[in-house]
Image (cartoon, grey):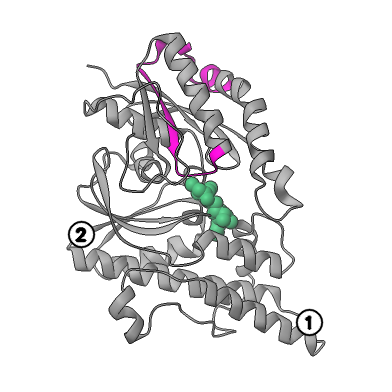
Amino acid sequence: MDAPLVLGIETSCDETGVGIVRGHELLADAVASSVDEHARFGGVVPEVASRAHLEAMVPTIERACDTAGISPHDVDAISVTSGPGLAGALLVGVAAAKALALGLGKPLYGVNHLASHVAVDQLEHGPLPEPCLAMLVSGGHSSLLRVEDVTVGVEPLGSTIDDAAGEAFDKVARLLGLPFPGGPHIDRAAREGDTVAIDFPRGLTSRRDLERHRFDFSFSGLKTAVARWVEMRERTGEPVPVADVAASFQEAVCDVLTRKALDAARDQGIEDLLIGGGVAANSRLRALAEERASSMGIRVRVPRPGLCTDNGAMVAALGAEMVARGRRPSSLDLPADSSQPVTEVLV
Ligand code: KG4
Ligand code: ZN
């Protein structure tokens, strides 16, 4: 059989993504974002996101098909993010995918958003090493996963016990008066700053914490430390050195993420670290992971920034892998599951 042609739909948060792949080949990656509509609220407003998905869905499907030069009738399967994510937003994508699958008479695969962040790397770097150690860092999740076969399941080794890494970036950006979503703005501001200007805390790295939380993360204390530091500056009337705060904060996050990810890889005897999710677009995280991993003989794979943030191609990539490995399609009454566990890769 030829590599499967799959159309994937992603609507778990604020990006309406429709991707088309043939096996590991990316043919189209159309994304319509409602991020500007949320900016003034400083976070994604679920109802606004759902409505925007509804408006963007059909035009985005059409745009993806045009770019790929295919008709929807050509596809071998439809895949869709069934969870986790915002319930109302997920429902729009799942309903659209069911309608397409039913109308076209094609199989439907409801797949996990987090596993899709892992599978997307195949579009850039080819088949996933098996096993690989995946670090997923996004606005809603920060996890370390052992991935044997991404179409069967993933094994969680640790995750954040409070804020996600991206959430910390967004909250600290807000404190510094930078726009939402904050990650890219901190990344940019940090380039002009000093990473050792301020010694911010590294969560869950003390010897005692490591006993219970070796592969877990905590970013809420770091966020509070930044808030206190900024408040103190403001109280004494001194200017806040935005670039230095951004650089020192970013260094604290990237230091802990890379240290724990590489510790997990070594512990598991795995030589390939894959980083995915929106925060994987961070330039310092990419550089530091590369630097530290190479000294340990561990290879790092990170998709290009555009494939790290939410998109439809990642859902199509996982769908195509499901088809290629002969996994059973989902039933047409598959639910949208806002809290779908990371271990459930196919519904
Ligand atoms: O994976 P994603 O697009 O959506 C979720 O599933 O959450 O991740 C979005 C998150 C946001 O918190 C955003 O601030 C962060 O990824 N992000 C970044 C960068 N680009 C996006 N964080 C740090 N540095 C970046 N360059
Ligand atoms: Zn995501």
Up the image or down, 67 lies above or below 231; here it is: above
Foreground pick, 322 / 275:
322
Residue 280 drawn at (x, y percent): 46, 55
Give me the disc on residue 153: none
Write down the quadrant of residue 320 in the picture: top left
Magenta segment boundaries in residue numbering: 63-87
Name the secondary structure under disc 1.
loop
Depth order, front residue of 272/15: 15
Side of 62 relative to 20 (left or right): right
Residue at which label 1 appears: 239
Q: Quadrant of residue 189?
A: bottom right
Residue type marked 2:
Ile
The residue lying at 58 percent from left, 84 percent from top is 198
Q: 112 above or below 281?
A: above
Q: Quickly name the residue at label 2.
A: 270
Counting from the top left corner in percent of width and height, residue 128 is at 26, 43
